[in-house]
Amino acid sequence: MHKPILIIGACGQIGTELTFELRNKYGAENVIASDIREGSNALMQSGPFELLDATNYAAIEDVVMHYEIDEVYLMAAMLSATAEKFPMRAWNLNMNSLFNVLNLAKEKKISKVFWPSSIAVFGPNTPKKDTPQNTIMEPSTVYGISKQSGERWCEYYHKKYGVDVRSVRYPGLISWKTMPGGGTTDYAVEIYHEALNKGTYECFLNGDTELPMMYMDDAIRATIRLMDSPSEKIKVRSSYNLGGMSFTPKDMAKSIEKHIPGFKVSYAPDFRQEIADSWPSSIDDSAAREQWGWEPRFDLDQTTEEMLKNLKE
Ligand SMILES: NC(=O)c1ccc[n+]([C@@H]2O[C@H](COP(=O)([O-])OP(=O)(O)OC[C@H]3O[C@@H](n4cnc5c(N)ncnc54)[C@H](O)[C@@H]3O)[C@@H](O)[C@H]2O)c1
């Protein structure tokens, strides 16, 4: 039997689906969902839930002790677009929550940590195409700075204290169960909702902005595969590049038009354009492929089919 798992930030876009998948795999009672707010009915009814503030060390420690938690998935964070509006709140949440979990592992109260980084660790001076695992980073957003610092701390805790922390740099994630939480790639979810509801969409990025993206099923599979891999295979203890697909809003519009003829997209770039322009357009994820067998399954057209089918139901 798998030892108990705690998910912090379980009600968000990724946390919700991660909770369902881990409960399928390890049993509902073995996966404790937690968040600072309640989540969807489906999530709340699927197993144990605790209201928990990720910045409160003592509160997390209580839950860890009570349920004899062995692994923590830390999904609570303030995302890129929102963080630009509240820089200090973002820094405090993103860093303090990570320190809390790393310190629990350092004190041997838990034995494994998953913490997600992001393509936002890269910046305007990073090579844009097939961005390598190790390269110039220099992120220019508060969110990216917090993720890059987080990566450095993860590697430090691994090297200095032997903490088994694992991480991937998620690209923009596309899913239908939960709306995205204030990132720069949110357009790639909103567009499907508006295509079905209105037949038109006003995109906040320009039509030629190419970004790395991934369908949620792939992201969840990558996360669980990384966590299941033997420790000696995990050579990167900062965070792994993770690739799925790369496309522009125009590509996405064309893919949707195959199912919804006449679908029209207009473009009105806002402050998020500058963030998107500072990020890679595609990712070299050969380290993840070679070291723990990562392989994406969904391309853009398959993502469109899944999104439209599930949102219609
Ligand atoms: N969604 C993406 O496209 C994407 C891409 C790259 C990286 N990531 C990273 O993955 C992780 C999860 O992202 P997401 O998209 O699910 O975010 P989200 O905003 O949808 O969810 C975050 C959750 O954290 C919760 N939360 C906020 N403050 C909290 C606190 N103090 N204590 C406990 N919970 C708190 C929120 O209520 C929310 O349910 C984050 O670290 C994010 O940076 C996401």
Image (cartoon, helix red, strand yellow):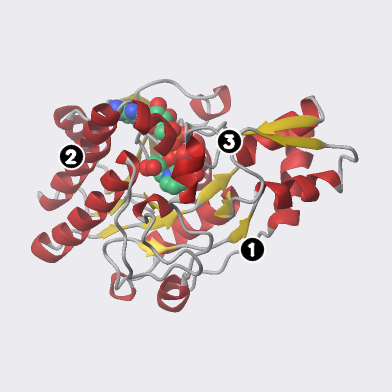
Q: Which of marks 1 and 2 is nearer the N terminus?
A: 2
Identify which amino acid the numbered label 3 is placed on: Pro
Identify which amino acid the numbered label 1 is placed on: Arg
Q: In this view, does 277 lie to the left or right of 192?
A: left
In the image, is the residue at mark 1 within 8 Å of ligand 1 by its beta carbon? Answer: no
At 18% from the left and 48% from the top, the residue drawn is 102
Q: Quadrant of ligand 1?
A: top left
Find the distance from the CA under tag 3 to the CA under tag 2.
Answer: 37 Å
Q: Which of marks 3 and 1 is in front?
A: 3
Quadrant hosting residue 151: bottom left
At 26% from the left and 27% from the top, the residue drawn is 89
Identify which amino acid the numbered label 2 is placed on: Asn
Q: Which of marks 3 and 2 is nearer the N terminus?
A: 2
Q: Are marks 3 and 2 in contact (CB under 8 Å)?
A: no
Disc number for residue 297: 1
Q: Can the viewer see residue 5 in this picture?
A: no
Q: Is residue 54 left or right of residue 310?
A: left
The residue that mark 2 highlights is: 100
Find the distance from the CA under tag 1 to the CA under tag 2.
Answer: 34 Å
At 52% from the left and 48% from the top, the residue drawn is 172
Question: In which quadrant of the rendered image does the C terminus lie?
Answer: top right
